[in-house]
Image: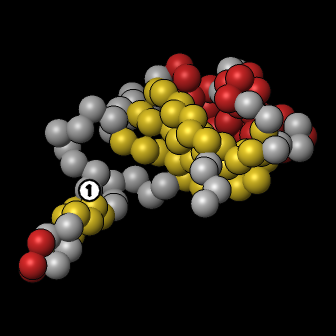
Amino acid sequence: MSQYLAVFHEAPDAVAHLSPAEMQALIGRYKEWFGGLRASGKYVASNKLEDGTGRVMRGGGSNGPRVTDGPFTETKDVMGGYFLVESGSFEEVVDLCRDCPHLEWGAIEIRKIEVV
């Protein structure tokens, strides 16, 4: 089995229009989906990333690394969270994520973890 990272991308204001009741219903749908993922035995770990925070490091040449705030307002989407799963293939991970409520307003990027 290999490990795959499913990264949740979304527009910064993707769910800002939801009422408190709609947000609670959405959270319930996520919990239901997550329960199915855990029951599949494929779940390894997950976390929601804190909204509006982050840092980006880039090499700065002789001055050392540069650190800037992020995510940036000019970006079209941000990473909202991730799931790490164990699976035999990309296709199986796609099937695990197929009914995830996140797909209604965002994207899920799936990356295989390369063991070095």
Location of residue 85 with respect to 67 vertically, above or below? above
Q: Quadrant of the C terminus?
A: bottom right
Crowdedness near tag 1: few (<14), some (14–19) or many (≥20) residues, C-alpha within 10 Å: some
Q: Position of residue 52 (x, y in %)?
A: 33, 54
> Where in the figure is residue 109, as x and y percent of width and height?
51, 33
Name the image quarter holding residue 36.
top right
The structure's colour scheme is secondary structure
Q: Is residue 115 visible?
A: yes
Q: Nearer the viewer, residue 104 or 43?
A: 43
Name the residue at 27% across, 61% down.
Answer: 56
Q: Which residue is found at the position 20% from the left and 74% from the top?
A: 65
Q: Report x, y in % for residue 62.
A: 9, 79
19 on left or right of 101? left
SS state under label 1: loop
Read off the residue under disc 1: 70
Numbered marks: total: 1
Residue 99 vs residue 104: left or right? right
Pick whichever, 98 or 114, lies toward us: 114
Q: Residue furthest bottom?
A: 63
99 lies above or below 2: above
Q: Determine the residue positioned at 22% across, 63% down.
A: 58
Q: Residue furthest front?
A: 116
Locate residue 66 relative to residue 80 in the image: left or right.
Answer: left
Is any atom of residue 19 visible in this view?
no
Question: How far across and how far down the image is residue 1, in percent?
Answer: 81, 44
Which residue type carries mark 1? Answer: Gly
